[in-house]
Amino acid sequence: MKITVCTLFPEFFDQFISTSIIKRAIDAGKITFSCVDFRAFTTDKHRHVDDTPCGGGAGMVLMCQPMIDCLKAVRTPNSLVVMLTPQGQTFHQSTAHHLAAVDHLILLCGHYEGFDERIRSYVDMELSLGDFVLTGGEAAAMVICDAVIRLVDGVILSESHEDDSFENGLLEYPQYTRPIEYDGLRVPEILLSGHHENIRKWRLKESLRKTLHQRPDLLQQRSLNREETELLAEIRQEEEEN
């Protein structure tokens, strides 16, 4: 998979691509990552990439010429161009899976007051991390790259992300490791039992419990099977009794 980030600040990504799983994915050839400074494409003699908004108003708007010319230079028939903007659809785990299957992902990082509207004619998708505004799209690009790269085949074991939060519409069950007891807090006995079916059922139940308490909206969006429905009823009965 190839990832190209179009940005005014390529140095923003130096540390990102040189650490942990991201670095290993690049070193192993699973990911090809590059940053392109779209200031290099401006035809303005002062190298400006922004200008005041037509009609007046605060802030500066990114000009269409350097950004469109940059996209024309890096785009291929297999590319998907994603604009990072608060106006985009919200990024979810399902979006990460979709992007992880793309041959060439191009992320367009905005800055200042926003994009000249004509740039959108050259974009395939607009994404947002949520209902808030960042100084620029670089931080959002790193979040999206991190979420996408770990899903690319061979970057991490599939078992490492199959039970992640949101993969099956639920939050992940509680996890524990050694020591078995610390400061009076003990690992649940069932996880030490070696009984795989009981452990599976406990994990599903605790996943449902955590989702019920922290993200009940996810349960409303999900069709529960018979086992999940019964476990959820058990959870509610237990909590009523306590």
Image: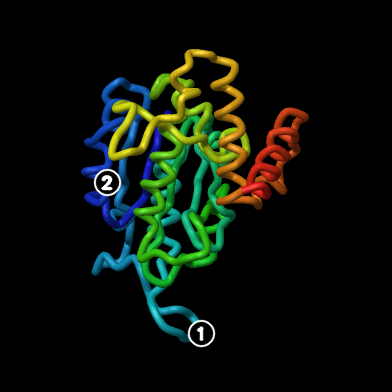
- Could you give the CA–CA distance between mark 2 and mark 1, rounded to whole angstroms? 35 Å
Answer with the quarter of the image where residue 66 lies.
bottom left
Instruction: Please tell me whether mark 1 sits on a helix, a strand or a loop.
Output: loop
Q: What element does badge 2 sit on?
A: helix
Q: Foreground residue, 221 or 45?
A: 221
Residue 81 is situated, as x and y percent measured from the top left of the image, at: 50, 45
Q: Position of residue 240 (x, y in %)?
A: 68, 49
Tag 2: residue type? Phe
Disc 1 target residue? 55
Say what amino acid the circle numbered 1 marks. Answer: Gly
Could you say which disc has been placed on residue 13 in the image?
2
Residue drawn at the location 33% of the way across and 27% of the way down:
180
Q: Nearer the viewer, mark 2 or mark 1?
A: 2
Residue 221 can be seen, yes or no: yes
Dot 2 or dot 1, earlier in sequence:
2
**Closer-to-camera residue (148/196):** 196
Name the residue rendered at 65%, 42% in the picture.
238
**Which of the 4 image quadrants contains residue 64?**
bottom left
Which residue: 26% across, 24% down?
27
Measuring from the top left, give residue 187's x and y in whole percent. Answer: 40, 30
Task: Please tell me whether residue 59 is drawn above or below residue 96 in the rendered image.
Answer: below
Q: As rendered, which of 153 and 212 lies closer to the eye? A: 212
Q: Residue furthest bottom?
A: 56
| Residue at screen point 38% across, 75% down | 60
